[in-house]
Image (cartoon, rainbow, N blue to C red):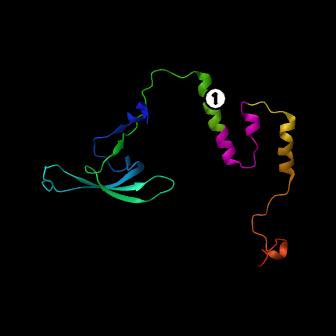
Amino acid sequence: MDQQALSTFNFHSTPDVGQLVIVRRRPFVVAEITAAAPGVAKDRTTHHLIKLSSVEDDGLGEQLEVVWELEPGTAVHEKPSLPSPDAFDDPRHLQAFLDAVRWGAISQADDKALQSPFRSGIEVDDYQLDPVVRALQMPRVPKRPLRPSEGQRSAPRP
């Protein structure tokens, strides 16, 4: 990790519920925190049993319980905050942002609309649109699966 990435982590604090943490080199979200009774540890420190839920694609929903103060290599991702605005953006940049939001909303609302080549910053040549025109003229796939009697081949039996 570079220095900028490390500045968003706190390696010494106890996390809050819902906060992103790194444990055993994997990202987790804190699901529950249980503090041990004071005086249980010999050094009079309070230990916390932390229940974690994985946010990785491969282990989504995987649960893990650790004693936070005894687990090596833990890090708490600090809660992000918005930057303080110090100046206004150039009106052209704001307009470009608003156009992008509007065009994205149009294409999501109407899935039949073909907007991207005409609304982007690229130059479209006629020969590039030929495959698009052909694809739009092709018959559509039925929404229900075909039965074997309607032309769908059944798998050959061994």
The residue that appears at 66% across and 47% down in the rendered structure is: 108
Q: Is residue 67 magenta?
A: no
For this orientation, the residue located farthest to the bottom is: 158
The residue that appears at 42% across and 31% down in the rendered structure is: 4
Where is 61 relative to 84, above or below? below
- Report whether 52 appears left or right of 67: right
Q: Amino acid at mark 1?
A: Ala
Nearer to me, 113 or 134: 134
The image quadrant of residue 140 is: bottom right
- Residue 92 percent location from the top left of the image: 62, 23
- Residue 73 percent location from the top left of the image: 33, 45
Q: Is residue 112 magenta?
A: yes
Q: Secondary structure at mark 1?
A: helix
For mark 1, what is the residue?
Answer: 96
Q: Which residue range is magenta in the image? A: 103-121
The residue that appears at 33% across and 46% down in the rendered structure is: 74
